Each structure stands twice: as C-alpha cells, then as structure tokens.
Image: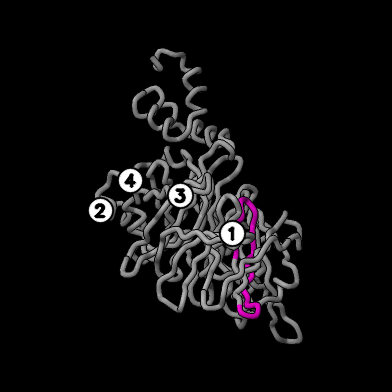
Amino acid sequence: MFDNLPLEIQLQIIKKLPIKSLLHFRSISKTCKSQIDTSAFISHYTTSQTQTHLQKHTLVAYQEPGDINPTYISFPDDDETFTQHKHFPTVPLLVNMLKDSVVIGTSHGLVCLYGFYSKTSMVVLWNLSIRKAVPIVVPNVGCGMYGTVVGFGVCRVTNDPKIVKITYIERESDLERISCVPWQVEVFTLSTRVWRRLCNNNLPRKTIKFDWGRVGVVADGFVYWLVVDRIMMDREYSSRNLVISFDVTTEEFREVNLPDSLANEYYYSLSTSKLRESLVVLQHGVDVDNRVISVWMMEDDVAKSFIKVFSVSVGTPVEAYLRGFRKSGEPILQVCENNLPIYKLIVYDPYSKQVDYLGISGVACTFFVYPYVETLLLLDQPNLGGYNETELIEYLDDLVS
C-alpha cells in the first residue's frame, strides 16, 4: 500500500521517521531505498531532525582486565532509569582491527576512533545506528621534534565529516631554530577523500604545545584543545594554559583565554569535557580531606567567559576522574576505592550527593564516555561489513600501500 502512494508523499513520510523505522522501510521498498541512499536525502534528513526529536545516547568504552579490545556499551539517555537499558552495539571488525585506539570525539551520531593499522596511523568513523565503519589513513604524522594531534567534527552546513591534523613543535629548545612547521595543519573531507593543507593566517602559533595524549572536545560545531603557550620571558620560557578552537565549517582557528585561576594552574591538573553542547574545563584538586573536581563551563567563545557551575567532592581514599556528563548534566565518574586496580563507573548528583553505580568495571585510563545521537551519515559509503577478516586485511593493506 505504501508503494502505491505518490513518491513525493512517500518521501515526506519517511523524512519524519526515526532511524529504525526508516531503515525498515529501506529494507522492504526498493523505491525508498533508492531515495534514502542518496547523499542529498542523508544530508537533508540529518539537518531536518532537530535535537529534540533525535534519540540521545551515552556511549561508554572501556577495557576489562586481560582484554585486547575495548568493550562498548550504549545507554538511551532519556530518563532516570537509563542504567537499566544497557545495549551492547555490534562492533564492526574494522573497529577491532584498529590497534591502540582511542575515541577522539563524537559528532552528528558518528564516533571517531584514532589508532594504528600495522604501523600506519588511521582514523575509523563508526555509525552505531547503521553498523557501518569507514577507514581513513592519516598521513605525515610527526615524530621526534614534532608531535601530532587529530580532531574530528561534522560541518554544520554540508553535514560532511572532517578530520583535522595538527603538527606542533614538541621541545622548547627547538622553538627558536624551527621557523616553519611542515604539514602544520591538514584537513580531510570525507566527500572528497582528500587531505589538503590549510595555509590561512590564523594557524596555531608555533609556541603552542598540544598534548598528543589528550583528545579534543567536539561541541557545537567546534573542536577544542587544552594547550600550553610557551612564552619567552627574561630569556626563559614560562607557560600559560589556554584553549585552541577549530571551527569545522569555516576551518578557522581561534585562541580562547582562560580565567587566571585556570591559565596558571598546573597543566596536568586540568582536563576538558562537554556538558550538553558547551565546552567545560575540569580542575582537579584537594580540599582538606576531599578530592575536588571543579567544573568550569564556557558560556560562549569570548575570552575568559568561563563560569564555575559546580564542584564534585569525594573522600580522599576514593580516586575519582570525571569522564563525561549525562544529558541532564549529572557527571559520570570513574572511581577507585582503597587503591584497587579496578575502577567503577558511577553517576553522581553534585547537589544531593547521590551515587548510582552503572555496573561497569574496568582498567584505569581506559574509560571514555561520550554522547551520541542516531544518524544516517555514512549510509552512502562503501559497506565493509560483509568482509571477512582476510578480505578486510587485503582491503586495508591496499589502502595503506
């Protein structure tokens, strides 16, 4: 009966459907499939689905003792009972073949992982909703005197996924003698599958030091990195913390100053996360007998527009790290009691002090918590899901050669 309706009416109906229903119609109607699989439909559907209609999820990645690959768990982040509805998404073989991988961001329903295949740096874009993953080789990765960080986002205008790679000078002793950083900034756009150099005038200054061990934060169309500016004063370098932002749409960088209490803080006492669609800087400290994590939120990207929204306080026998936030704003913490090697994941209410355990335990430094939504992005990309391990190895070997 649906196929008997005029095509225009069919399209109007399916554009308003949630992902699961849309994929169902795609599987039973050749007409729907031919329309849904076009890049134009995917982009329009992504744009037209407002944040209030998209199902929001929280993705947790972690490793259990002895495991080689991370475990992924998804929660529908819709109410207080979300911990009762765990879902273990089907992990593509391609994702598990990426070694030493870390999640470097989520945007528009895509999860971006960065790691290695063989000895080649590689990014994998993964859409959990449609169980599809796409590999991207990352070229010109710095070593020795240079370091490299990689960021990810989706253009708000074209819905085109982009990867940005930044090369920076590692050591202060090399700042004076290096006048130009090779391949300083390169951007990959999925629609063209081409890496290109950015040569505009607002690239990060060479005194800016990124940290390859820290991932950027993707929020509201920007990628943010917490960095150190190495400033020469009286023939010696001093350091000051700040934030570098990258607009995924315009491909412009900006420097965002921090309040003095954060700018002058010990760099490794700070970390970053995302609260809804705002960047937050987390300040870790100790107050009397408590470990305290202060949450500073950026109201906009004007200099020093950070406000302290709340603090998380736990007893000193408990080691705690803030890994992310629920849609409601409640922080999700990784905690360890009595110096045990296994950490637990909890949801903490900073006002009532109530703690809810998620039933997830894993190895330290392997927890990643990210929000994501359902999306059709990557639907028009080649499907590697049907490849067995031998076929996928051959495909990746050709890709990196």
Q: Are there few (<14), some (14-19), or many (20+) residues within 10 Å of tag 3?
A: some
The span from disc 1 to disc 2 (Cα, nearest Å) is 44 Å
Residue 384 lies, in percent from the top left, at 33, 45
**Viewer-nearest of discs 2 and 3:** 3
- Is the residue under label 1 in contact with that under label 4 (CB below 8 Å)? no
**Viewer-nearest of discs 3 and 4:** 3
Q: Quadrant of the C terminus?
A: bottom left
Q: Kindly state the secondary structure of the residue where label 2 is placed.
A: helix
- Is the residue under label 4 in contact with that under label 3 (CB below 8 Å)? no
Front in this rendered view, residue 338 or 322: 338
Query: Which of the numbered marks, if any, corresponds to residue 349?
Result: 1
Query: Which of the numbered marks, if any, corresponds to residue 389?
Result: 2
Query: Which of the numbered marks, if any, corresponds to residue 384?
Result: 4
Kind of residue at disc 3: Phe
Residue identifier under label 3: 75
Give the quarter of the image for residue 4.
Answer: top left
| Sequence order check, earlier mark of 4 and 1 | 1
Residue 193 visible? The answer is no
| Sequence order check, earlier mark of 1 and 3 | 3
Residue 114 painted magenta = no
From the viewer's perspective, is 92 left or right of 302? left
**Viewer-nearest of discs 1 and 3:** 1
Q: Kindly state the secondary structure of the residue where label 4 is placed.
A: loop
Kind of residue at disc 1: Asp
Q: Residue at x 49, y 23 (%)?
A: 13
Kind of residue at disc 4: Leu
The span from disc 2 to disc 3 (Cα, nearest Å) is 29 Å
Q: Are there few (<14), some (14-19), or many (20+) residues within 10 Å of tag 2?
A: few
**Viewer-nearest of discs 4 and 1:** 1
Residue 82 lies, in percent from the top left, at 48, 48
Kind of residue at disc 2: Glu
The span from disc 2 to disc 4 (Cα, nearest Å) is 10 Å
